[in-house]
Image (cartoon, grey):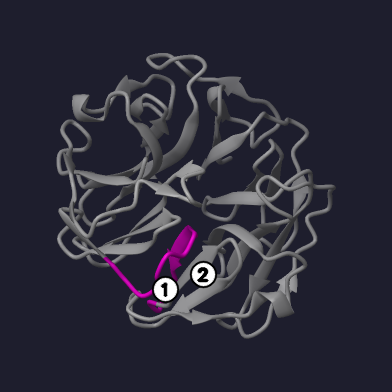
Amino acid sequence: MPVIHVGAVGQSVWRSDDGGTSFRIRTKGMWAECDIRALTTQPGHGEVMYAGSNSGVFKSTDSGSTWEPSGTEMAGREIWSIGVSRQDRELVVAGTCPGGLYMSEDGGDTWREGEGDAIAQDCFDGAMQTRITCVLMHPKERDTVFAGVEADGPRRSRDGGKTWHRIGLEDVDVHDIRMGPEGTMYLSSNYEVFRSDDEGDSWEPLHIADHFRHSYCRGMSFSPTAPRVLYVGNGSGPPGNTGSIYRTRNRGESWERVDVNGDTNSCFWQFACGDEWMLASTVLGQVFRSTDGGENWGKLAWEFGEIRGLVCVG
């Protein structure tokens, strides 16, 4: 049965060993009331995990039972996203708030800040600080990494995170970036989903206003059993008071709204996938589960506070 981890704001990391029926908080080695905004595993080694918090990066080598700070260079930084390379498990990239990109080539022992095109430090006329909402490691190329900035557009690195350059879209409020098995990329924002067939050099809007109930989109995921089927988390706003999941089987040419079999309290913020399971969480604490690759869904009885990290292993 898959192991589920949930990262919550002010509640650190929770783990379920019974598929989501019950959870226990796992905070040994980190502050019990950490704000967790990123959770990820090392590809192929699910027991190795990284957590992004309001006080830096934490790493676990025992499936989240214990944690330790990862790199003194990240201490005190607010971490919003983390990615680990499939080709080189020692290559880790983390994004911060205010917007900054950092890379490690020794599994998080030491870090250095990336260079390149400057990232704005505030957005929305100074009302907010920018943040790196997503890091996407290329599934086949070790040195190609993508990142999304809220709200300063997408970035790409061709040298493993050492240098970064803006690509394709100007001043877009980027929420997530994903790449399908054939290389097609998708980018979600606060008003649109975009598609790229040239690794981000150009983007095509998919006109979701013609298909979605609301325009605000957050996390995305491909089905673990049908990897060309894309799921998009949607809702009435951040956080909003209702959420929806949409999916496309044909690169965004058409969409269908997924029946999650339960009432939702806010926007669907993120997804996590195991071998066959999919999880989707709303930002205000609900977790929905599919055990058949996204075809049928149901809500877990257990609810949290504000969820920002979600992992499913197995």
Residue 253 picture quarter: bottom right
Residue 12 higher or lower than 143, as above or below: above
Identified by mark 2, the residue type is Pro
**In terms of secondary structure, what is the magenta stretch mainly?**
loop
* Mark 2 neighbour class, 10 Å CA radius: few under 14, some 14 to 19, many 20 or more: some
Where disc 1 sits, the SS reads: loop
Q: Position of residue 167 (x, y in %)?
A: 31, 71
Magenta region, residue range: 166-183
Whether residue 174 is in magenta: the answer is yes
State the residue at coordinates (56%, 22%): 11
Determine whether, in the image, residue 3 is placed left or right of residue 283.
left
Are the residues at dot 1 and dot 2 in contact (C-beta closer than 8 Å)?
Answer: yes
Q: Nearer the viewer, residue 67 or 201?
A: 201
Determine whether, in the image, residue 161 is placed left or right of residue 217.
left
Q: Nearer the viewer, residue 124 or 165?
A: 124
Q: Position of residue 221 (x, y in %)?
A: 54, 61
Q: Nearer the viewer, residue 93 or 120?
A: 120
Q: Which residue is mark 1?
A: 181
Determine whether, in the image, residue 77 is placed left or right of residue 87.
right
**Numbered label attached to residue 70:** none
Whether residue 112 is in magenta: the answer is no
**Numbered label attached to residue 227:** 2
